[in-house]
């Protein structure tokens, strides 16, 4: 009786050991797969970024509409038809291709991320990770230099981190550089800071669902 019990116990332990080994084995296998497919996942990231750029209509303002084969795709304003009048100021969609002198070539993917998440002009904002929304804290500039409207960053900032990194990867590594110098946008001395307060553009993250204007849905 005692020895049978001991036997079943050791069988149980053996089974446990097999399970542990199998789990450990599968972890190792998964890591191996991830390593081997690193370049594949980069390609996938660029393709995801491309899709996001197309369906967020970046090309409607930055050139090319929804067609990555179009001439001037993301190359920025070429003539005054793409220029905006924001009150007394003229604003101009910039060149998003990775040209070093006239496009995003001289900026890092993190600066592009910060432009879309926080609306900060990449040419005038240091290349740092930002951890706070309060000016002067967590690397958020004390005197932020915001992108001119109608660049819709107040809406685009609600994309996930991953989506913003995907867009940055596509703009830096998935588009050919085009030389096109876009004249600087005009704007108020506070770089639109007074136009981008939470009462005007909402909060980030967005308020919890449902707000007073939303329906909680069936069963609620
Ligand atoms: C409604 C028009 C509009 C749309 C749509 C738009 N942008 Fe812009 N974008 C602008 C304008 C105008 C500027 C110039 C802002 C300035 O000069 O301060 C700009 C500037 C930028 C900049 C800063 C570039 C630099 O060199 O300073 C980035 C990055 C950018 N846009 C990315 C995007 C991406 C990515 C999308 C789509 C997800 C997009 N934009 C969609 C109008 C637009």
Image: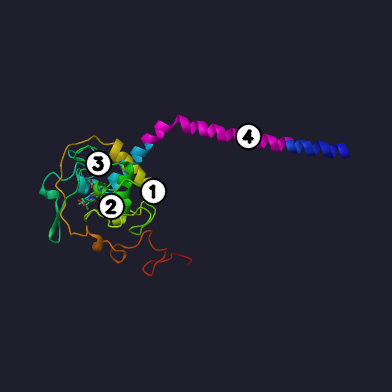
Query: Dots 3 and 4: beta carbons under 8 Å?
Result: no
- Name the quarter where the N terminus is drawn: top right
Residue placed under numbered mark 4 in the picture: 22
Q: Earlier in the sequence, mark 2 or mark 1?
A: 2
Q: CB of residue at label 4: within 8 Å of ligand 1?
A: no
Query: Dots 3 and 2: beta carbons under 8 Å?
Result: no
User: Percent from the top left, x then y, of residue 29?
Assistant: 54, 32
Crowding at dot 3, Cα within 10 Å, few <14 / some 14-19 / many 20+, comes out as many
Q: Earlier in the sequence, mark 3 or mark 2?
A: 3
Q: Count the labels in the image.
A: 4
Q: CA distance from mark 1 to mark 4?
A: 34 Å
Work out whether residue 192 or residue 139 is closer to the camera in this orientation and state it.
139
Q: CA distance from mark 2 to mark 1?
A: 16 Å
Q: Residue at x 40, y 32 (%)?
A: 40
Residue placed under numbered mark 3 in the picture: 104
Crowding at dot 1, Cα within 10 Å, few <14 / some 14-19 / many 20+, comes out as few
- Residue 42 relative to residue 92: left or right: right
Residue placed under numbered mark 2 in the picture: 120
């Amino acid at each position: 009786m005692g020895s049978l019990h001991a036997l079943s116990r050791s069988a149980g332990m053996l089974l446990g050991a097999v399970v542990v080994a199998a789990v450990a084995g599968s972890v190792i296998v998964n890591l191996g797969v991830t390593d081997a497919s690193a370049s594949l996942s980069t390609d996938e990231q660029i393709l995801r970024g491309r899709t996001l750029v197309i369906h967020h209509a970046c090309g409607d303002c930055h050139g090319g509409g929804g067609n990555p084969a179009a001439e001037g795709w993301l190359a920025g304003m070429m003539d005054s038809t793409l220029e905006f009048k924001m009150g007394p100021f003229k604003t101009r969609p910039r060149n998003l291709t990775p040209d070093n002198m006239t496009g995003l070539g001289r900026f890092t993917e993190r600066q592009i991320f910060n432009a879309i998440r926080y609306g900060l002009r990449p040419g005038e904002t240091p290349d740092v990770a930002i951890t706070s929304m309060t000016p002067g804290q967590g690397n958020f500039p004390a005197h932020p230099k915001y992108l001119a409207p109608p660049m819709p960053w107040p809406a685009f900032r609600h994309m996930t981190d991953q989506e913003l990194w995907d867009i940055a990867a596509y703009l830096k590594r998935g588009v050919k550089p085009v030389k096109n110098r876009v004249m600087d946008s005009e704007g108020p001395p506070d770089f639109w800071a007074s136009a981008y307060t939470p009462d005007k553009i909402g909060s980030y993250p967005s308020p919890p669902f449902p707000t007073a204007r939303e329906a909680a849905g069936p069963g609620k």
